[in-house]
Image (spheres, rainbow, N blue to C red):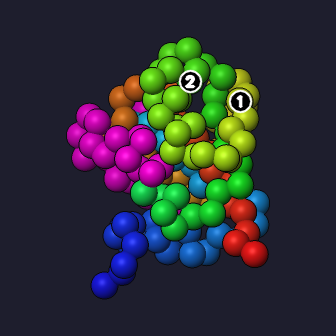
Amino acid sequence: MKKTALLNQPLSSLIAELGHTDTVLVADAGLPCPQGPRRIDLALCPGIPGFIDTVRTIVTEMHVEEALVAEEFLSASPHLYQELLETLPGIPVRTLPHHELKALSPSAKGMVRTGEFSPYANVILQSGVVF
């Protein structure tokens, strides 16, 4: 059995496949899933699993060098944005308009759908290298 926090097999496999600059989109329950990325649907009911819990668990295995969020996230869900910054210490978090974030989503290697119901609770995590 694995020793790390991440137990979900499809998500662990996705992270193992990432190369430098590949991306993973962690999304709220309402973001549409485009054609292209592997969809890993974790949503069970409103709020479960939450956005922050999901990101926190992913970064136990994924080396993240940069994160992208929608500008709208900062004002629509400021408490979650602050928690995201605390979850990604030392990692640059860039903002862009929500429509641009959605336009980048088809190029992600995977999309992880959470049960989060907070507006704009979406982040694109860019893979770094560990050496």
Query: Up-down: is 92 above or below 36?
Result: above
x and y percentages locating residue 118 in the rendered image = 40, 26
Q: Amino acid at mark 1?
A: Thr
Please report the residue visible at 60 percent of the width from the left and 55 percent of the height from the top: 24
The C terminus lies in quadrant: bottom right
On the image, numbered disc 1 is attached to which residue? 95
Query: Closest to the observer: 11 or 86?
Result: 86
Extreme residue toward the left, this view: 45
The stretch of residues the image draws in magenta is 30-56
Query: Up-down: is 10 above or below 95?
Result: below
Q: Is residue 40 visible?
A: yes
Please report the residue visible at 56 percent of the width from the left and 15 percent of the height from the top: 75
Please report the residue visible at 68 percent of the width from the left and 60 percent of the height from the top: 127
Looking at the magenta stretch, what is its main secondary structure? Answer: loop
Q: Is residue 33 visible?
A: no
Q: Are marks 1 and 2 in contact (CB under 8 Å)?
A: yes
Calculate the distance from the C-alpha at mark 1 to the C-alpha at mark 2. Answer: 9 Å
